[in-house]
Image (tube, rainbow, N blue to C red):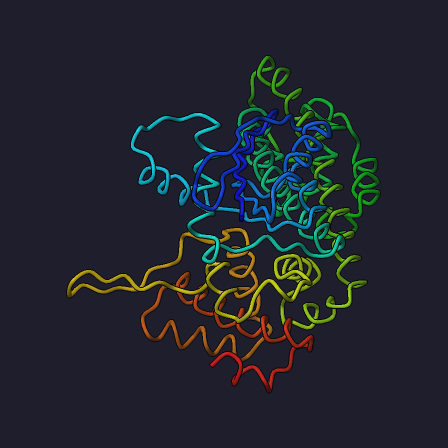
Amino acid sequence: MKHYIGIDNANLTHSVSIIDENGNLLKGFEIENNNDGFQKLRMNLNNYTDPVIAMEIPHGPLVDFLRTLTFKKFSLNPLKVKRFKEIYSVSGNKNDIVDSNAIAQYIRFNEKKSREMIFNSQEVETLKLLGISHERMKKEHTRYTNRLLFIFRQYFPLYDALFSETAPKILLKMVIKYPIWTKLKAENQDDLKKFFIANKYCNGKYIEKSLKKIHDYVHNVAEEVETALSFEATTIANILLMLKSQIAEIEKEMAKITSNHSMGKIFDSLPGAGALLAGKLLGMMGDNKNRFSNANQAQCLFGTAPMNYQSGGYHKVITRKACNKRSKSILYAYAFSSLRFSKWARGYYDKQRKLGKRHSVAIRALSNKWLKIIYSMWQHEQVYNEKLKSSIAA
């Protein structure tokens, strides 16, 4: 007899429900989010034949433990489980046991329609997680940059307009060394030039331009405002310098993994990908060929394939929302980047624009075509060939 195990993931404890193929609850219990809890789960699973495990959150120590087991494992969409629970149970109760039981019941009815969790090699899993960390840190970098610019406009407007680039390293180091106007004004021109050159700002024309801005600047900020906000500005400048350094290290590590991987050359060959996007695309597709049986599965999972909406005589094409949004974003970024490096991509985009499509719609359509090409390259392990793309993307 087949058995289904539903696990409701949490931070400290996980609720587990075990049901048989008729839907009868055989056992419900909790396990801690540590090795003792995982071994308790293993002992219970060994008592049942052919267990199928399902959960909502596909990451964390529990998932890493389950990865070592040979049983079938499924990661479910929480919204689908919620809707199923509303149909399956009329009580409206909300607790961990009820939720884990609903997960077990859902996979009992929908095992054939659900996507089994398939893991990639350790290198590619590392690459994927590095890509996620990179995106989080870039968001933090943007957030702190905007916050620093806001502070500049309150206490030191010169720093907001000194360089054309937004918060470059040299500006951050200036904030740390010269947090208030009196310190910057007291520095002589020769020492400022040495400071610029030491921080790789070596173009004489731009140095003179910056020195002139400093010379002509008139400071009209109250001393108490300047004193108070300079501490916050210095703190944020230090944080941004650290973020820049760590982001660069992550990008370096991602490029290293991509170049050393057997499939790295496939994604490196994509026009306009660059080292960063090539690594993210490899992490997105993975190196386990069992993930997809055709390109359409990848297009649906990654959200590039549009959906038809029809009600009576009304019909329209809409973007797919139930998908892997991170992968969708990566493909969108790559499609946009490819416009400068691929003639056919530019031609396809221009054709969509002439048909009246908005920029974002045209890029999404192009990303859908690119994914079809990428899937073929990935499946057959061949580098990009401009001559073959027409037949593949058609």
Residue 161 position in % (x across, y down): 59, 40
Residue at the image point whose x is 54% and y is 51% from the top: 326
The residue drawn where x is 65% and y is 28% is 33
Instruction: Answer with left or right where residue 335 lies relative to residue 384.
Output: left
Image: 20 above or below 230 = below
Q: Residue at x 37, y 38 (%)?
A: 85
Q: Residue at x 61, y 42 (%)?
A: 48
394, 338: nearer the viewer: 394
Farthest residue toward the front? 1
Foreground: 254 or 87? 87
Q: Residue furthest top?
A: 224
Q: How many marks?
A: 0
168 lies above or below 296: above
The spot of residue 75 in percent (x, y) is 54, 47
Give left or right: position of 28 versus 249.
left
In the rendered image of this protein, does residue 5 appear above or below residue 360? above
Residue 343 placement (x, y as % from top left): 55, 79
The residue closer to the viewer here, 28 or 308, is 28
**Which residue appears farthest toward the left when viewing the image?**
313
Q: How far from the left and from the top, in percent, is residue 250?
A: 74, 47
The image quadrant that residue 357 belongs to is bottom left
